Image (cartoon, rainbow, N blue to C red):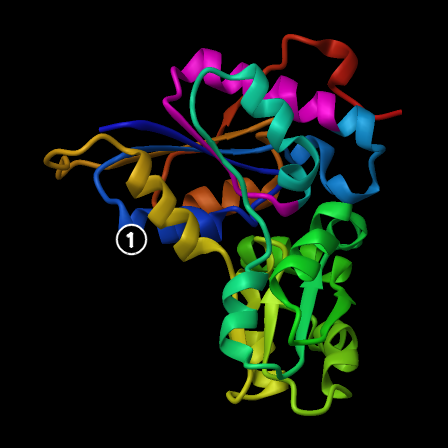
Amino acid sequence: MANILVFDSGMGGWSVLEACRAHVPGQHWHYLCDNAALPYGTKPDAWLTERILAVVGTACAELRIELVIIACNTASTLALEALRARLSVPVIGTVPAIKPAAEQALGKPLALLATSATLSRRYTQTLIERFSSRSIVHPVNGDALVSEAESFMAGDAVSAYTLKAVLAPLQAIEDLHGVVLGCTHFPLLTPQLRLILGDHIIWYDSGAAIARRVEALLPPGPRSDAERVSVYATDAERSTVRAVCRRSGLGPPCALKLSEPCLMFFD
């Protein structure tokens, strides 16, 4: 049984956790959300990079982590290389599933539904240029869906008006093949999104690819029948993370205390 950290700014990485648990059972999963700094997309890059390094580094030291999954597109495009340089354990990042989507689209248009922070990264544009030479990829700002996904995970109703407003640009794309979900929050809303756009649209996310990568990095041998899931948060009193733990049959989240107070709050 390996100690594996799944890290996200909020509860979006839960979609990655569930994909990994289904594909690689029998591990001790440590889910960590930096919800005290949510949303990440509004923070300056330099501050955010140091914040991510501090939060993930603290968790790795305290929990004896053997493998890290950065289940956040914004954090991955910003701090992945810095994390790999600082940590002594493997670090798996999350990037939009543009490559498999483009391979299946056969030249038909695609949409990349992501946060403004992910859409603005040069890394994202490089993915599009490298893997999607035949298909036009239409960027669509999905910032409003992050809070909707967080509310959904807390057990609250999702705003159909907000979802329709976000998806309106996609409905204008002729012969759209599929939508790449460029934020781990968004797969949590796929059933609601599908109701709006229809079943003919294919939805692509990175959960399965991350799970396969986890399996490849784990040592060979028999897997344990036991499995544990522990949840940590930089703000353990927030209703969303507590509701997810309660609905999942888990104990209340544990608070992760940072050793660098200057990074506790963004001014």
Residue 233 in the magenta stretch? The answer is: no
The residue to which callout 1 is attached is 22
Quarter of the image where one finds residue 33: top right
260 to the left or right of 116: left
Residue nearest the viewer, comparing 20 with 256:
20
**Residue 248 in sight here:** no
Residue located 60% across and 62% down the image: 131
* Magenta residue span: 49-73
Residue 237 in percent (x, y) is at 60, 32
Q: Is residue 194 above or below residue 14?
A: below
135 to the left or right of 228: right
Alpha-carbon neighbours of circle 1 within 10 Å: few (<14), some, or many (≥20)?
few
Residue 145 in percent (x, y) is at 70, 61
Residue 180 in percent (x, y) is at 60, 67
Secondary structure beneath label 1:
helix
Q: Can you say which quadrant of the picture contains the C terminus? A: top right
Residue located 59% across and 83% down the image: 177
Residue nearest the viewer, comparing 80 with 107:
107
**Residue 2 in sight here:** yes
235 to the left or right of 221: right
Residue 57 in the magenta stretch? The answer is: yes
